[in-house]
Structures are given as C-alpha cells and as structure tokens.
Image (cartoon, rainbow, N blue to C red):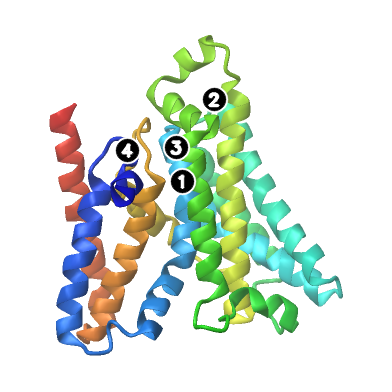
Amino acid sequence: MAVKRFLRGVGNPNPCFLLMGMLVLSFALSRLSPYFWTGRNIANIIDQASVGIILSMGMTFVVDAAGIDLSIGANIALSSLVAALFLKQGFGCLPSVFAGLLLASMSGVLNGSLISFLHLNPFIVTLCTMSVFRGAALLLTDGRPVFGFPESFMSLGSVLPGGVSVPALTALSVAGLSMFLMRFTKFGAYACFMGCNEEALSRSGVNCHRWKLAFYAVSGLCSGIAGLILCARLNTAEPLSAVGIEMDVIAAVVLGGTDIRGGRGSAVGSLLACLFLALLRNGFVIVNVSARYQQLLMGLIVLVAVSVSEMRHGRRA
C-alpha cells in the first residue's frame, strides 16, 4: 500500500514503468558484475544522480506550469562562482552559501518576471538569460576557474560515516519536499492548473504572476544548491561548468511523466527518472561501453522512452 501511494504521482503510469525498468536493469547488471549490489556502488549511483535530482525538482514545477528554464546550467556557473569569490575574499561559509543561493533565486525571479509581466515566451527568455548568465560568469573571473576552498565548505560535497554522501542526502530531502509540495499544497496544485488553463486560474482570483515568479524562483534556488554541491565536490568553480545540463534535466523530467506542454507533473517520476538514468550510466561502465558511445546511447534510449510515453498520452487524450 505504501509503495502504491508513493508511485501515485499526478495520474500517470510513468513512475511505475520506470521502477519496473530499474528492477529489470538492476537484475541484469547484478548478473554481469558481482560488485553491482555492493553498498559502495549503490551509494555511488545515488550520489551521481544527486545533482540531476535537485535540478529536476525545480524544473518539474516550471514545466508543469507550462514553462521551461534553459538557464539552469549558466545559473549554476554564475551562482557557484559568486559563492567561491565570497569565500576567497574571506567571508565565512554561511555568508558565501547564502550569497550564491540568493543570486540563483533572484536569477529565477528575473526569468519569471520577464515571462509573466512582459508576456514573453519562456523558451526565448531563458535562452537569452542563459547567454547573459554565462557571459557574466566569464566576465566575473575573466574566464578563469576559482579553486581552493576551506574544509567547512568542502563538507557540502563530502561523504558521511556509513558511506552516504551529503549531496545524496540533500537531493533526497529536496525530492521529499517537492513531492509534498506537489501533492498536498497550493504550490503544486496551482502549477498544474496554470499548465492546464492559466486564464481560467487567473479569473478565479489567483495571482498567476506571483505564482509564476515562485516557480521560477524555486528552479533558480535548485540551480544554486546544485551549483554549490558541484563546487564543493570538485573544489573548484568554473564559468563553463554545467554546460548542456539543462537538456539532461528536461529529458529526465519528461521521462518521469511531466507533460512538456504543462498541466501534468510528477516529482516522483522525476526522481525515478534521474535514478534510472544514473543506473543506466553505471551499467555502461560495468559493461565497458566506450565513453564515445555512452552519450549517443543515452540520447537514443531517452528519445525512444519519451516518444513512447508521449504517444501513449496522446492516445489517451
């Protein structure tokens, strides 16, 4: 019963199919390698999926509300660089983290403001701000990376006793909160209603401008959290970090059952999709698939899975 309630997202079967796919893939990989079911490998899979999970949670709300955010990769680079520069200037860990998260959130608010108040296309707006944020990151350090951070900051990317990493715990916490917001609060309900019919929601008395700002602010905040984790994990902040990560995140969100046209979202599905893709990458390593072919195979697998999902939803519509 608990599993059934967990998988019951927003009325779509994608989480169930993803879970079955993960079970089949896990069984196959366990037959190929005796090291697959080791605690270290499982922890590594979750750790590798952590950044994608955090980003996909924010993206799920945006896409559910019939939006898109292509600027998350550039936002990661800019916000992590700002946090890194604060650290290098002698500010403590908490002020630096706060500065990075605040900038990331305000970047999301900027996206939401341009889209909501100026009625601009979300794709065009976030494509432009992606270029602006990336350019600002390059100008901030003249294209050079910033590295060498204190231990207090590095702990954000560390592994706790027992083999569980801080990024994994952070990702699962963000996912749990997102599932709660999606299922039990106005935040999730209004995202879905806005994606279905924003005009009707507005005429019912809901301030759609304010809620749209909130959705993009959450996406920006998730970008900031992911940026800090990457920065702490690698002990460096680079202006060209996370290039193209937005495509992987959007693919995971759609694979998880969120309708790219809006009106149907699933935080559970996004979580499982990120874990499924991380499991798939782990499987490529186990069977020694060349890195030259991994990206090609990942793209083809996601394309087929998303196409099947969209065709199924199209028939039901």
Answer few, some or many: residues within 10 Å of disc 1's Cα (few below 14, many 20 plus, some between 14 and 19).
many
Q: Mark 4 or mark 1: which is in front?
A: 1
Q: Amino acid at mark 3?
A: Arg
**Residue 199 location (% of width, % of height):** 47, 15
Left/right placement of residue 187 relative to residue 68 reads right
To which quarter of the image does residue 138 belong?
bottom right
Residue indicated by mark 1: 179
Q: Amino acid at mark 1?
A: Met
Answer few, some or many: residues within 10 Å of disc 4's Cα (few below 14, many 20 plus, some between 14 and 19).
many
In the rendered image, the vertical position of residue 47 relative to residue 176, given as above or below: below
Q: Earlier in the sequence, mark 2 or mark 3?
A: 2
Whether pointer 3 and pointer 1 mark residues with C-beta atoms closer than 8 Å, the reply is: yes
Residue drawn at point x = 49 percent, y = 52 percent: 176
Residue drawn at point x = 14 percent, y = 83 percent: 31
Whether pointer 4 and pointer 2 mark residues with C-beta atoms closer than 8 Å, the reply is: no
Residue indicated by mark 3: 183
Q: Mark 4 or mark 2: which is in front?
A: 4
Residue indicated by mark 2: 119
- Mark-to-mark CA distance, 4 and 2: 21 Å
- Mark-to-mark CA distance, 1 and 2: 29 Å
Q: Amino acid at mark 2?
A: His
Circle 3: element type = helix
**Residue 165 location (% of width, % of height):** 53, 76
